[in-house]
Image (cartoon, helix red, strand yellow):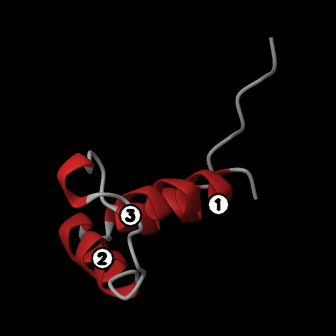
């Protein structure tokens, strides 16, 4: 089983200062102009949310 990465103390300290609601709203604002090709009646997750999940996953492995 692979070992878990050690958390960088600088990142941990910075993460405590982040206002999650403000971050979420800023991400929604950045992706607000992205066209959503899905049928509005069948949307489970909005496009901005899916892009946020993809971005967070990508950043996790940097």
Callout 1 crowding tier (Cα within 10 Å): few <14, some 14–19, many ≥20: few
Q: Secondary structure at mark 2?
A: helix
From the top left corner, tell me how far across and down residue 61 is, in percent. 73, 51
Number of numbered discs visible in the structure rendering: 3
In the picture, measured across the screen, residue 13 lies left or right of residue 19, that is: right
The residue sitting at 22% across, 60% down in the picture is 40
- Mark closest to the chain's N terminus, 1 or 3: 3
With 47 as the anchor, is 2 left or right in this view? right
Asked if 56 appears above or below 3 in the picture, the reply is: below
Q: Quadrant of residue 62?
A: bottom right
Q: Quadrant of the N terminus?
A: top right
Separation of residues labelled 3 and 2 (CA atoms): 9 Å
Q: Is 38 on the left-hand or right-hand side of 40?
A: right
Mark 2, residue position? 28
When asked about the image quadrant of residue 8, the answer is bottom right
At 30% from the left and 57% from the top, the residue drawn is 39
**Which x, y percent locates residue 37?**
41, 67
In the rendered structure, are the residues bearing label 1 and label 2 in contact, judged by CB atoms less than 8 Å apart?
no
Determine whether the residue tagged by mark 3 lies in a helix, strand or loop.
Answer: helix
Q: Residue at x 72, y 37 (%)?
A: 5
Q: Are marks 1 and 3 in contact (CB under 8 Å)?
A: no
Whole-number angstrom distance, CA of label 1 to CA of label 3: 18 Å
**Quadrant in the picture for residue 29:** bottom left
The crowd level at tag 2 (other Cα within 10 Å; few <14, some 14-19, many 20+) is some
SS for dot 1: helix
User: Tag 3: Cα neighbours inside 10 Å, few (<14), some, or many (≥20)?
Assistant: some
Depth check: give the residue in front, 38 or 3.
38
Q: Tell me the tag on residue 59.
A: 1
User: Residue 47 bears which disc, if any?
Assistant: 3
Which residue is found at the position 57% from the left and 65% from the top? Answer: 10
In the depicted view, which residue is nearer to us: 27 or 15? 27
Q: Is 19 situated above or below 29?
A: above
């Amino acid at each position: 089983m692979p070992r878990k990465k050690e958390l960088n103390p600088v990142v941990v300290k910075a993460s405590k200062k982040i206002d999650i609601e403000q971050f979420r709203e800023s991400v929604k604002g950045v992706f607000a102009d992205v066209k959503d090709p899905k049928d509005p009646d069948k949307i489970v997750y909005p496009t901005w949310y899916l892009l946020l999940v993809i971005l967070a996953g990508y950043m996790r492995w940097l």
